[in-house]
Amino acid sequence: MTDWQIGPVPGRGLRRVNGGELALPLQILQGGRHCAIARLELTLAEAEQLHAALCYALGEQPPPPDAPECRRPVRYPGGRQRY
């Protein structure tokens, strides 16, 4: 394991760039010290694939109270619950 870390930049969220692509600023740390900020740029198709993969991975976990709507269960007629 290395002492490098990559994570979201606090206070700087996802935004649109380059005519519709999405960019997420990420901070790069080494040993807990800031080194750089880089952007993860995604096309809309890549963002949809990432969204689907995250929903699938989180599917068995109960959503926290402040979760966005897409993480909340939907009750369909007949009592089935889907995400």
Image (spheres, grey):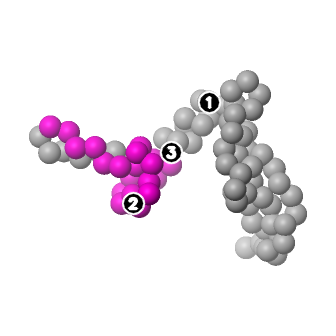
Label 1 element class:
helix
Give the mark toward the camera: 2 or 3. Answer: 2
Please say if 3 is above or below 35.
below
- Taking the spot 75% from the left edge, 54% from the top edge, the residue there is 26
Residue 56 visible in the picture: no
Marks 1 and 2, how far apart at CA = 28 Å
Image coords of residue 66 (percent x, y): 44, 57
Say the numbered circle drawn on residue 16.
none
Marks 1 and 3, how far apart at CA = 14 Å
- Taking the spot 73% from the left edge, 73% from the top edge, the residue there is 1
Please say if 62 is above or below 68.
below
Which is more N-terminal, label 2 or label 1?
1
Reading the image, the residue beneath label 3 is 53
Marks 2 and 3, how far apart at CA = 21 Å
Of 24 and 42, nearer the camera is: 24
Give the mark toward the camera: 1 or 2. Answer: 2
